[in-house]
Image (tube, rainbow, N blue to C red):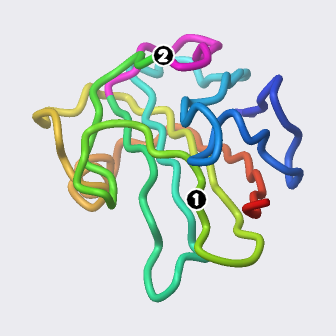
Amino acid sequence: MRILSPAFSHNTMIPKKYTCQGRDISPPLEITEIPAGAVTLVLIHDDPDAPGVTWDHWILYNISPVGSIKEDFIPGVQGRNSWGRNDYGGPCPPSGTHRYFFKVYALDVQLNLPEGATKKQVENAMDGHILGKTELIGLYRKS
């Protein structure tokens, strides 16, 4: 599997539009080489550079195994992010440049989870069902 974004390249700066300093909307993503047999996709967008914890920005599951996720679009069920909301929260580092991971997993099942599941609940439910994984890293530093 491969993931890319028309808005930014791997290990480059995420445009301000997709952050807390801009419109705070999700960026467009393109997913290719989805494994045969994939029933759903999971997207986990997080920041491992947040002080003391990995900050969860967007948890999305039961996405149809399609090749693209449009900008500012919710193609699946949203889980609970670190702000305690079931939505996308863009990059907003308190200081310095942070890495923002967009991890996509292809699963052989649909997850039996309600809206608002935590990243840990999603990861536990995915266990044993992952057919493929890919990730895109974007960077952001407040101006």
Q: Is residue 81 left or right of residue 57?
A: left
Mark 1, secondary structure of its residue = loop
The picture places residue 12, in percent across and down from the top left corner, at 89, 51
Q: Quadrant of the N terminus?
A: top right
Quadrant in which residue 27 is drawn: top right
Q: Which residue is mark 1?
A: 92
Name the foreground residue: 33 vs 80: 80
Q: Is residue 48 left or right of residue 60?
A: right
Judged by depth in the image, the label closer to the viewer, 1 or 2, is 1
Name the foreground residue: 74 vs 66: 74
Q: Which mark is residue 44?
A: none
Residue 66 lies in the magenta stretch: yes
The picture places residue 141, in percent across and down from the top left corner, at 76, 63
Using the numbered discs, state the Cα–Cα distance from disc 1 to disc 2 in whole angstroms. 20 Å
Mark 1 packing: few (<14 Cα in 10 Å), some, or many (20+)?
A: many
The picture places residue 69, in percent across and down from the top left corner, at 58, 17
Q: Is residue 69 left or right of residue 57?
A: right
| Earlier-in-chain disc, 1 versus 2 | 2
Q: Is residue 40 above or below residue 118?
A: above
Quadrant in which residue 118 is drawn: bottom left
Q: Main secondary structure of the magenta part?
A: loop
Mark 2, secondary structure of its residue = loop
Q: Which mark is residue 73?
A: 2
Q: Which residues are magenta?
A: 62-72
The picture places residue 23, in percent across and down from the top left corner, at 59, 31
Mark 2 packing: few (<14 Cα in 10 Å), some, or many (20+)?
A: few
The structure residue drawn at horizontal position 73% and vertical position 21%, both measured from the top left corner, is: 32
In this view, which residue lies farthest toward the bottom?
52
